[in-house]
Image (cartoon, rainbow, N blue to C red):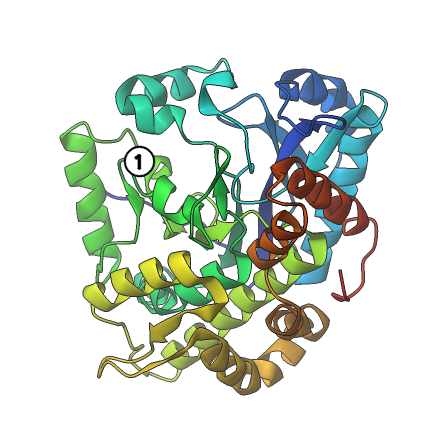
C-alpha cells in the first residue's frame, strides 16, 4: 500500500482541543454539542478555526488553522472558544476540560449520530462506551517523509514528559483512581490505540497499514490511534498522548514543547545523526509510570536504563532547547512548561480541591469550570491559578 505524505511547511503547528459541555449548576455533562455546532455552522464557516463534534454529544472539539507559530495556533483556539461561548453562555452551558470528568457515568451519555461512531461502539462494546475521555492533539509539520518514522520513534521517549505535564484525570466515574492520568490507560484499550509500533521507516509504516487494512482491522490511516502517529493527510506528526489541558496557557506550553522537540529531531536528522529510540519495554514502562505518578514519576531516559525524575529531565530538556524555542518564536509559550513544573499540573490542583471539600467532586468540577473560564480569556503566560 502506498500512502502519500502531504507537503507541509516545516514545524508549523495545528492544535485540536476537546472540551466538555456541562450544566453550570450541577456540573454534570449535557448532550448539547449538536445544537451548539449547528448554531455556529454559518458563523464559523469563513474562519481559520473549526468547531466540530466528537464521539459523545457532551463534547465539542475546537481546532486551529495551520500556524506558523504556536501563538498563531493558540490565538485560533481562543477565537474558537469565544465563538462557542456566544452560544453556550446564553444557553446556560459551561465549558471545562480535563482528561476525565470527575463524576459523570458512561451510561448517562449519548453517542453522536454518525456511522463511524456507532461502528466503533458496536465493535468495542463496554470499553467503547467508557470512552469518556478528553484530550489534546498537537500537529507539527515535517518537511521530509523519510524523517517521519524516526521522529515518531524519538518522540515516544518524551511521551511520559508530555503525559505528566498534561495529566488531569485523577478521578473516574466518581472514584479517586490513584492515577494522575487514568485517561492514558483507558484510551489504550481501543483497537490500534496506545504506543506506536517501533517502525524504522515509511515503507514499514505502509506495510503495517497494508496488513491492518487487508485483515479488516481498520479502513485507513485515520484509524491509527497511537499516542504519537503520522498524519499523512496533513503532512504532520501528531502527538495524542496528552490529557485535556485545563487552561489555555497550559495548552500553549505543551504545544510549544512538542514543536520544539520535533524541530530539534528534524535538525539532528539534517546533520546525519541517528535519533535515539528507547527499547519498547522502556517506553511502555515510562507510560505507566507517568500515568500513575504524573510529575512525581521517575522515568527511564536512555537505552542504558538510566532513570531520572521526569521533572529533572524536563528541566534539562528546557535548558537544552531554549535557543530552539527562541528561533521558533515560541519562547513565551515554552516558558509555560517551567511554570507547570513550579505550580503543579491539573491533576494536583483537582486533588487539592477534593481534599479541601471533603471529597465533594462537584466542587472539583466547579474548580475546572472557573479555571477554564479564566484561562482562555487571556493570552499571557501561565501565572498562579
Left or right: 44 in relation to 351: right
Residue 161 x %, y %: 45, 67
Instruction: Find disc 1 in the rendering and name its residue.
Output: 190
- Dot 1: what SS? loop
Name the residue nearer the viewer: 280 or 216: 280
Residue 342 x %, y %: 64, 74
Q: How many marks?
A: 1
* Quadrant of the snapshot with the N terminus: top left
Q: Residue at x 32, y 58 (%)?
A: 288
Q: Residue at x 53, y 82 (%)?
A: 315
Task: Relative to 225, say whether 306 is above or below.
Answer: below
Label 1 crowd bin: few (<14), some (14–19), many (20+), radius 10 Å:
some
Residue 83 x %, y %: 79, 33
Residue 304 image-quadrant placement: bottom left
Name the residue nearer the viewer: 116 or 306: 306
Left or right: 168 in relation to 181: right
Q: Residue at x 63, y 56 (%)?
A: 352
Res 154 seen here: yes
* Quadrant of the snapshot with the C terminus: bottom right
Res 142 seen here: no
Residue at the farthest front position: 358
Q: Residue at x 31, y 77 (%)?
A: 275
Residue 250 x %, y %: 65, 59
Task: Relative to 4, say whether 253 is above or below.
Answer: below
Left or right: 17 in relation to 231: right
Task: Relative to 316, say whether 263 is above or below.
Answer: above
Task: Relative to 5, say whether 385 is above or below.
Answer: below
Amino acid at each position: 500500500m502506498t500512502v502519500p505524505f502531504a507537503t507541509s511547511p516545516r514545524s508549523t503547528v495545528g492544535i485540536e482541543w476537546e472540551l466538555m459541555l456541562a450544566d453550570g449548576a450541577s456540573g454534570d455533562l449535557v448532550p448539547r454539542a449538536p445544537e451548539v455546532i449547528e448554531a455556529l455552522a454559518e458563523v464559523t464557516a469563513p474562519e481559520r478555526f473549526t468547531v466540530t463534534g466528537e464521539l459523545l454529544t457532551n463534547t465539542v472539539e475546537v481546532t486551529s488553522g495551520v500556524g506558523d507559530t504556536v501563538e498563531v495556533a493558540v490565538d485560533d483556539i481562543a477565537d474558537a472558544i469565544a465563538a462557542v461561548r456566544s452560544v453556550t453562555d446564553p444557553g446556560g452551558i459551561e465549558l471545562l476540560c480535563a482528561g476525565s470528568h470527575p463524576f459523570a457515568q458512561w451510561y448517562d451519555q449519548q453517542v453522536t449520530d454518525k456511522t463511524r461512531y456507532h461502528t466503533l461502539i458496536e465493535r468495542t462494546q463496554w470499553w467503547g462506551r467508557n470512552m469518556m475521555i478528553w484530550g489534546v492533539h498537537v500537529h507539527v509539520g515535517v518537511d521530509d517523509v523519510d524523517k517521519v518514522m524516526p521522529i515518531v520513534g524519538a518522540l515516544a521517549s518524551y511521551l511520559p514528559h508530555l503525559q505528566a505535564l498534561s495529566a488531569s484525570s485523577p478521578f473516574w466515574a466518581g472514584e479517586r483512581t490513584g492515577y494522575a492520568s487514568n485517561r492514558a490507560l483507558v484510551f489504550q484499550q481501543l483497537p490500534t490505540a496506545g504506543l506506536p509500533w517501533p517502525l524504522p521507516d515509511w515503507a514499514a509504516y505502509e506495510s503495517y497499514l497494508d496488513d491492518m487494512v487487508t485483515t479488516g482491522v481498520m479502513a485507513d490511516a485515520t484509524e491509527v490511534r497511537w499516542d504519537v502517529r503520522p498524519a499523512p493527510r496533513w503532512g504532520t506528526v501528531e502527538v495524542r498522548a496528552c490529557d485535556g489541558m485545563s487552561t489555555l496557557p497550559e495548552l500553549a506550553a505543551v504545544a510549544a514543547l512538542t514543536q520544539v522537540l520535533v524541530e530539534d529531531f528534524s535538525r539532528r536528522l539534517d546533520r546525519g545523526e541517528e535519533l535515539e529510540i528507547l527499547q519498547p519495554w522502556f517506553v511502555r514502562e515510562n507510560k505507566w509510570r507517568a500515568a500513575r505518578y504524573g510529575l512525581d514519576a521517575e522515568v527511564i531516559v536512555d537505552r542504558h536504563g538510566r532513570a531520572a525524575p521526569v521533572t529533572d529531565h524536563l528541566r534539562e530538556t528546557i535548558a537544552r532547547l531554549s535557543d530552539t524555542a527562541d528561533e521558533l518564536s515560541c519562547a513565551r509559550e515554552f516558558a509555560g512548561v517551567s511554570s507547570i513544573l513550579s505550580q503543579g499540573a491539573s491533576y494536583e490542583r483537582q486533588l487539592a480541591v477534593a481534599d479541601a471539600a471533603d471529597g465533594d467532586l462537584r466542587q472539583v468540577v466547579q474548580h475546572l469550570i472557573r479555571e477554564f473560564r479564566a484561562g482562555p480569556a487571556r493570552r499571557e503566560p501561565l501565572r498562579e491559578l
